[in-house]
Structure formats: structure tokens, C-alpha cells
Image (cartoon, helix red, strand yellow):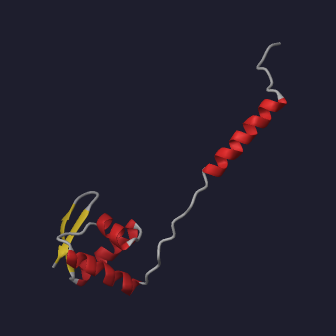
């Protein structure tokens, strides 16, 4: 019976060329963050805390250039050491200030 028409060979070639061209434009580049050891990272984080009125994990991760989970971990560790204190904790955000 009927059905959809089949594309011509030249139309299929043009379509393949367009798809290849779009694939080249979409190359994904990954950003590699510099690795700092635990002590260096804590020192850098503490310097950021000293210079600011308050610090959130997002603020710290953007200034120190680490992952958000790593900055949360650092802030909790500094808080347990007594260097900084937890001012307020919401469901999403923890706010720390210098002790």
C-alpha cells in the first residue's frame, strides 16, 4: 500500500553532512579543577572566611574553585574545630561566620 516516501540519495547525503557538522560544533570540553591537598584547601578556605562577613558552601566553592560537596565538608570540619560557627541552617543552605 502507501507509506512514507523514501529519501533520495542526494537528500540522505546532505542530511548526513549536516549532522556531522552539528556534531563537530557540540564538542564538550571538561574543566579540570586544580587539586589542592586537605591542609592547603582548609587554609585557603579559612582565608576566605576571614575576609567575608559570612560564608555559604556555594560562596566558598566559587572562590576556592572546588566542588560544592567538598566545600560543605571543609566548612563542617572548620566548624567542628571551632574556627568558624554555624549561624543558621536552612533545609538547603548552611551559613557560617568567623567565631
Residue 8 picture location, percent across and down: 82, 27
Furthest residue in direction top, as rendered: 1
- Residue plotted at (18% across, 73% down): 97
Taking depth in this image into account, of 8 and 70 the one nearest to the observer is: 8
Residue 73, picture quadrant: bottom left
* Front residue (pair 95, 81): 95
Left of 49 or right of it: where is 9? right
User: For the point 27% across and 76% down, which residue is it?
Assistant: 48
Residue 29 image offset from top left, x and y in percent: 56, 61
Q: Is residue 27 above or below residue 68?
A: above
Residue 17 lies, in percent from the top left, at 74, 41
Using the image as rendered, state which of residue 69 and residue 65 is in the foreground.
65
Above or below: residue 1 compared with residue 23: above
What is the x, y in percent for residue 46?
Answer: 27, 80
Residue 28, image quadrant: bottom right
Query: At 69% across and 40% down in the image, what residue appears?
Result: 18
How many numbered dots are placed on residues in this image? Answer: 0
Taking the image as shown, residue 40 lies to the left or right of residue 22, namely: left
Rendered residue at 69%/42% (across/down): 19
In the displayed structure, would residue 36 be above or below residue 12? Answer: below
Which quadrant: the N terminus? top right
Work out which quarter of the rendered image holds the C terminus and state it. bottom left
Q: Is residue 86 left or right of residue 1?
A: left
Q: Quadrant of residue 64?
A: bottom left
Amino acid at each position: 500500500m502507501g507509506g512514507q516516501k523514501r529519501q533520495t540519495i542526494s537528500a540522505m547525503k546532505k542530511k548526513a553532512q549536516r549532522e556531522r557538522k552539528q556534531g563537530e560544533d557540540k564538542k564538550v570540553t571538561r574543566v579540570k579543577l586544580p587539586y589542592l591537598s586537605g591542609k592547603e584547601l582548609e587554609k585557603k578556605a579559612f582565608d576566605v572566611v576571614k575576609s567575608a562577613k559570612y560564608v555559604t558552601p556555594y560562596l566558598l566553592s566559587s572562590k576556592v574553585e572546588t566542588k560544592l560537596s567538598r566545600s560543605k565538608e571543609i566548612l563542617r570540619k572548620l566548624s567542628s574545630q571551632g574556627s568558624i560557627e554555624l549561624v543558621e541552617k536552612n533545609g538547603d543552605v548552611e551559613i557560617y561566620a568567623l567565631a
